[in-house]
Amino acid sequence: MAGGKLSARQKMINLMYLIFIAMLALNMSKEVLSAFGLMNEKLTVANTSATDRNMSFFANLEQQAGEQPEKYKPLLEQAKSVKLLANDFDSYIAELKGNMTSTVDDPSDYEIMDKGDYLDQNFFKGDNLKEEGQRFLDEMNKFRDGIVDVIGTDFPEIADDVKQNFSTDQVVDRNGLKRDWIEYNYKGFPLVASLTKMTQMQADIKDTESEVMSAMLQGTLSKEVSMTNYTTLLETSKSAYFNGEKFDGEIVLGRKDASTKPNRVELTLDGRALKETEYSIEDGKVKLIINAGSAGEHKIEGKLIFAQDGEEIEVPVSQTFATVPKPNAATISADKMNVVYRGVKNPMTISFAGVSDNKVVANAQGLSRASGSKYVMDATSIKGREVTINVTGTLPDGQKVSDNAKFRIKDLPKPTGTVRGEDGAIKMQRNSLEISTIGAKFDDFDFELPLNVTGFKFKVPGQPTITVSGNKLNSRAKAALRKAKRGSGVQVFDIQAKAKGVSVLLKKVSPVFVELTN
């Protein structure tokens, strides 16, 4: 303060200011020092009581965790973390206080603790911190941040208090200047004042530990009796209802409690014993982990066994649930497009929503069941242009529901002739036509019905018509083709075709016209 690039006058003023501060320190009232000492003693006694109280809290929490681990074990783990942080910081401060009082001949004589040499020399070096001063801040920050990390989400109010009580942020002094927290609180103070502040900090540590464990126990008790620990259950006389029926459900309260769980579970699903992997116990509830099964009604029976006063108490279970087919496709239909074809096996899917396939019966002339909801309609022998399919379903309660649908019956479409897979009027080289395959197909038809050509007629302008067996040109047809001129129009007509599995005669196959390009 008296050095640096200052005028002689300013150096003298600064030096006088230092002497004035020293005189104040030398003349500090002995009564004030003694008052600090007495306060330190009372805080020390209170800290001893707080330590005993915290040990009692922790022992109680350990006992509860042993009896009800699901409820109290997570809290005990939090309490252990808080206790470890508190003990570490408290032990560090106790060691620091021991070092501070070792500098005086009689630690009980507070009137001689009027100097601040120990902390000034060990914490500070000019305007900077020494290693021990930085360690003090680090220990304090470690305790504060550690407590907040452990309890912040569960006890936010306590966490906020910890942040405030153990803050090391800069402080604004009475002159409106910002100063470092450690300098503002410990630099230049008498030893007894700093000692008392350290003891007060130990009290704050123990109070924090007490608040956390008290909040844990009180919070658990509050949760047990709180209405938020209850849920609503719906009891019904049956598992499914239909349009027009009266709903007779009843809403009741059920309590969720992880500690209230059965010692043994014996359950069956439709008579089959459930394995341990097919259920779990959560919040006092037995959660089933099973497949919903096929459509229809399913029954869960058995018992939950609880241990009470050394005896086993059985709670019977008898519940039902219904499984309905999962909708995986929309029902979209075009008016007047319900069509089946003569001569082929028309595949059909017939089902009733909410009714299992084995409870559905469909009837119509030419209709037969393949498996499940899959049917086949053969309309070949049906006279007339329509067929009606009647469907009846049996509900779980025995009621029957029915419906029907009409389908138009149509003949197979007219086949189209092809040469090398092309139809209509096409252009082709002479040598390509010689080796091409004559075929037939159904244009834009939903059924996969490959046609097999067994014969056709071949006509070259100026040459007699040649009848060919099979699906390729024979020697006579090739000879006639060689005589055709470039640009001539060759006809392939009266194509004979058959389809595998078709029991009706096909309509006449349309011809193909080929223009020779060479």
Image (cartoon, rainbow, N blue to C red):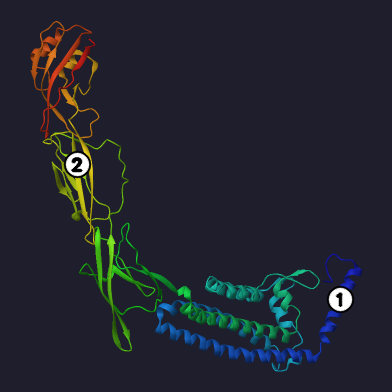
Q: Secondary structure at mark 1?
A: helix
- Name above or below for residue 29 compared with residue 387: below
Q: Secondary structure at mark 2?
A: strand
Q: Is residue 107 left or right of residue 420?
A: right
Q: Position of residue 252 (x, y in %)?
A: 39, 73
Q: Earlier in the sequence, mark 2 or mark 1?
A: 1
Residue drawn 34% across and 63% down?
A: 246
Q: From where the camera sits, is residue 104 visible?
A: no
Residue drawn 73% across and 85% down?
A: 193
Q: Position of residue 430 (x, y in %)?
A: 19, 13
State which mark lies toward you, 2 or 1: 2
Q: CA distance from mark 2 to mark 1?
A: 115 Å
The amino acid type, in three-letter code, at marker 2 is Thr
- State the quadrant of the N terminus: bottom right
- Residue 251, by quadrant, is bottom left
Q: From where the camera sits, is residue 488 visible?
A: yes
- Residue placed under numbered mark 2 in the picture: 388
- Residue 480, by quadrant, is top left
- Residue 187, by quadrant, is bottom right
- Which sits in the foreground, 368 or 216? 368
- Residue placed under numbered mark 1 in the picture: 17
Residue at the far right in the pictured view: 9
Residue drawn 21% across and 7% down?
A: 486
- Which sits in the foreground, 3 or 49? 49
Q: Position of residue 5 (x, y in %)?
A: 85, 64
Badge 1 crowding class, 10 Å Cα cut-off, few under 14, some 14 to 19, many 20 or more, is some
The amino acid type, in three-letter code, at marker 1 is Tyr
Q: Is residue 408 left or right of residue 219?
A: left
- Which sits in the foreground, 275 or 151? 275
